Amino acid sequence: MFTVLYRIIKLSLQDISRNIWLSIVTVTILILALFSVNSLFTVQVISQNAIEAVKSKVDINLYLKNNTNEEDILKLKSQLEKMPEVKKINYISQQEALSSFRQKNETNPEIVQALRELGKNPLSPSLVILPVNTESTDLLINNLRAYQSDIIESRDFNDNTVILEKINNITNSINQVGLIVIAIFILVSILVVYNSIRVAIYTHRREINIMRLVGASTNFIYMPFIVSALIYSLISMAVIIAIFYPLLTLLQPYLEVFFMGYNVDIVSYFTNNFWSIFGLELLIVVIINVFASLIAVKRYAKV
Amino acid sequence: MINIRDVSKFYGSKVGALQDISLDIQAGEFVSIVGQSGSGKTTLVKLLIGEEKTDTGKLVVGEWDITNLSWSHVPYLRRQIGVIFQDFKLLPKKTLTENVAFALQVCGQKPARIKKIVPSVLKIVGLEDKKDRYPGEVSGGEQQRAVIARSLVHQPKILLADEPTGNLDSINANEIIDLLLKINNFGTTVVLVTHNREIVNRLKKRVITMDNGYIIGDQAHGKYIIR
């Protein structure tokens, strides 16, 4: 068993070394294909982070009329709390709003002076609403827009939908272009691997002929070429991992500046999801390459 | 050992490479199949090694009906039949020993067995002194001996030699025929396909003559008759 495996791997390495330049081109095309896939994936991760960051900034406030009595406000609060999209509601009374405002602006003498001259509390009581999660924000905002109550004076949703829409649009455009690029690379990869195996079969035609003559099994004749495709996959995957991590490390400081205040760590993301990202990619590349080489051997190395 | 019954083989719809031929070859026989180019000799060899399939009739090798042999079983058939061709089919970058060992390696034989068998077959064909030479460093006759050694590694019951002397001068050709006779004396059935009249006439063994896909002569101690 191990003897046969050893001989198959030996023949496969012979295939690769006899056509070394073609092997290098094959691996390079596979690396480019994998690079495009991973770049697209990185953009996807970054855009998801951007969307989460913007969504977490969502500030939903209902400002209430100044003369509303507290009983009505609490009644409204309890009604709104029944909404499934609402996680928590904080009631900020007129006095609390003023205290908070004063505290925030205590270093600004002009504002302090203006408040003193006004002689009364100009701020409204408010309800600060926290959504259950970022996904339910849009629905909550729509529901609150439609909610009718006499005591509501104004609604401030600090509407980020335009920004979210823009991020989504950019991400979708990148995804669409990226998917086309990936499809082209996958097609080119299949053709290049197919051609490499075809040339390997051609350079090995004498051996194949002798193998057939002396009774080598079909599997033994086919397997070295399949193993070659497997080796191409492994090498290209190893190279892409070796290239991609330093690139992510270079990208990380720029992301930290861009998403200041948010925990965006692309390197950790790829490390934590190493097997689900690179493992899955390896599996797909192996399947594609083995498929391409199987077609080639079935066609050109008939037994 | 070989039973051929009413076998026909057509290429295209009209050209009959073999037409309704029947033939029995007993174990241990030395049989020459002769005929001009295009008489069907090589087609018969191709049928016997499973490279082609019959269109009609029945083909039995040993006790194995190979008429409708599946492609997956062809390698097992070829381990039972040694084949020698006119072009030597040796790997130029391997020594004679490595060339012979290659036949065992690709069939999954263990290194210990290969080390045991290879020197013994090289000794049978008289190449033990040149075992480490490359094909380019030995004569055509010696290359054909190496091919014969390679065909013997699976200890075949049948040895098919398709024009084995075609590329050799008369001295080397006679040496190869002597070697085939020696192998035949060990009990191996030898089927020699040739159009070399001198060799066939010297052998004084059974001669089957083919022409246009038909068997036109089968003599126990025959000669090559030119029509």
Image (cartoon, coloured by chain):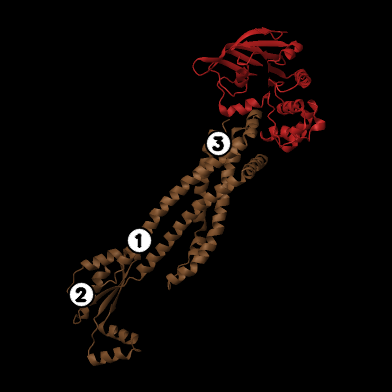
Have a look at marks 1 and 3 and say if they share a chain.
yes
- Give percent across and percent down for residue B140: 75, 27
Give the number of the mark in front: 3 or 2: 3
Would residue B31 appear left or right of A133 to someone viewing this image?
right
Whether labels 2 and 1 belong to a single chain: the reply is yes
Q: Quadrant of residue B1?
A: top right
Instruction: Determine the secondary structure under disc 3.
Output: helix
Which chain is assigned brown?
A: A
Asked if B129 appears above or below B173 in the picture, the reply is below
**Chain B, hue in figure:** red
Which chain is disc 1 placed on? A
- Type of amino acid at the residue the image marks with label 1: Asn
Residue that numbered label 3 is attached to: A297
Q: Is residue A125 above or below residue A181?
A: below
Asked if the residue at tag 3 contacts the one at tag 1, i.e. Cβ–Cβ closer than 8 Å, the answer is no
The answer to the question of whether label 3 and label 2 lie on touching residues, with beta carbons closer than 8 A, is no
Disc 2 marks a residue whose amino acid type is Ile
| In this picture, residue B128 sits left or right of residue A75 | right
User: Distance from label 2 to label 1 (Cα)?
Assistant: 32 Å
**Distance from the alpha carbon under mark 1 to that under mark 3:** 45 Å
Query: Residue placed farthest to the right in the image?
Result: B129
Q: Residue A152: which disc? A: 2
Q: Residues within 10 Å of mark 3 (few under 14, many from 20)?
A: many
In this rendered view, identify the residue nearer to me: A190 or A139: A190
Residue designated by label 1: A168
Q: Are marks 2 and 1 in contact (CB under 8 Å)?
A: no
Tell me residue A148's x, y (percent).
18, 69
